Image (cartoon, rainbow, N blue to C red):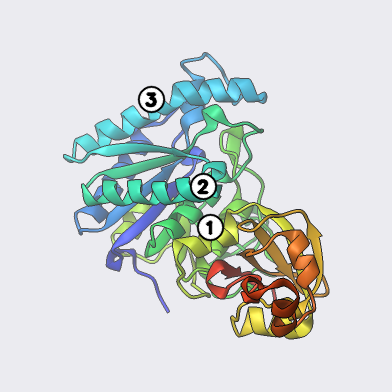
Amino acid sequence: MSFNVTEAKRLVIKVGSSSLTTVDGGISVQALNRLVDACQGLRSRGIEIVLVSSGAIAAGLAPLRLDRRPQDLAAQQAAAAVGQGQLLAHYSRAFGHHGAEVGQVLLTVEDLIRRATYVNALRALEKLLALGVIPIINENDAVATAEIRFGDNDRLAALTANLIHADGLILLSDVDALYDGPPQAGGKPIAEIARTEDLSGVTLGPRGRAGIGTGGMVTKVEAAQIVTAHGIPARLTSAANAERLFAGEEVGTLFLPRGKRRGARSAWLAHLAHTKGRITIDQGAVSAVAERRRSLLAAGIIEVTGSFEAGDVVEISSPDGQVRARGVSSFSAEEVRTMRGKKTAQIAQELGEDYQRPVIHTDDMARVEVPA
């Protein structure tokens, strides 16, 4: 199987800070212009693009007279607040030369955890694309309530690809491919990753160069695994290769899709939702729920941990503690404890007909990929 980006209808393109910055740490207008010109080549083919761009903190360093990325959260937030406007101005000017409009969308993983804002984000992005606007997405670093975690934009790009049902995820950095070891130590580029097992023995490198980027190969591989588990291919290469890639050349490393394409709700459950507890099920229920994709019934439940209410998301684990699914519980933790291990008829007799429903319906459940 292959993946030619020129045959896609919709792509999410993520570019890292290290690909957009100069040696001194500021935004490289030349590098940004090259990226925009390459992206415009895709748009000229009728391909919709969503750009997930790092670089806000880097863009704010020079205006704040900082010679390196600050370590404390408040200074990072200040740099992001100043730099985000400058970064968007650069994109607006560069795409404007092609007669295209851009729209800023600032998101955090925390925003997407809430179902209402998750749906609103989808609607906003769909409308921008329908209007011919290029959404420029970045994490909302300026209002982060915890330390700005490395790799969030890689993960955010993967979740965005799932959110908008993209045909592919492109991860652009300062490395031309995934290598099986450090290139300086003789590591070789890997052309294709078809299975999780293909990553066995691969040595992943450190964080971005010069302390500008916060991601690294680890987070890019994790992002690729998120989308491929949902049936979306990913390609990883350098920003310098963008023009060749967008012209149809097969450069970098291709991550082949493994799972089936699933909807936005499934992606939310699998990767975004905060879980409030755990339900441990017996091996028979594991087979029914995880393998045959059935609803979870009370009879297969052997243990309930945590405190949750009806409508909360919980983990579903096998007897050995391995999480096999996540889903929205129809009942509270106390109710599930009362129901566990009992047949549906017995539950109806003891608690009433309303308790005959599955504890978690299959439509409210996302199965979790288990490493081989």
Residue 50 position, x and y percent, is 35, 49
Residue 205 position, x and y percent, is 66, 51
The amino acid pointed to by label 2 is Leu
Of residue 110 and residue 332, the one placed in the foreground of this image is 332
* Picture layout, residue 88 above or below residue 329: above
Instruction: Determine if residue 22 is in view.
Output: no
The amino acid pointed to by label 1 is Trp
> What is the secondary structure assignment of the residue under circle 1?
helix
Of residue 211 and residue 286, the one placed in the foreground of this image is 286
Going 21% across and 35% down the picture, which residue do you hit? 96
Label 2 vs label 3, nearer the camera: 2
Q: Quadrant of residue 358?
A: bottom right
Residue 112: which disc?
Answer: 2
- 88 lies left or right of 199: left
Q: Quadrant of residue 11?
A: bottom left
- 15 lies left or right of 194: left
The amino acid pointed to by label 3 is Gln
Label located before the other in sequence (2 or 1): 2
What residue would you read off at disc 1? Answer: 268
* Picture layout, residue 286 above or below residue 31: below
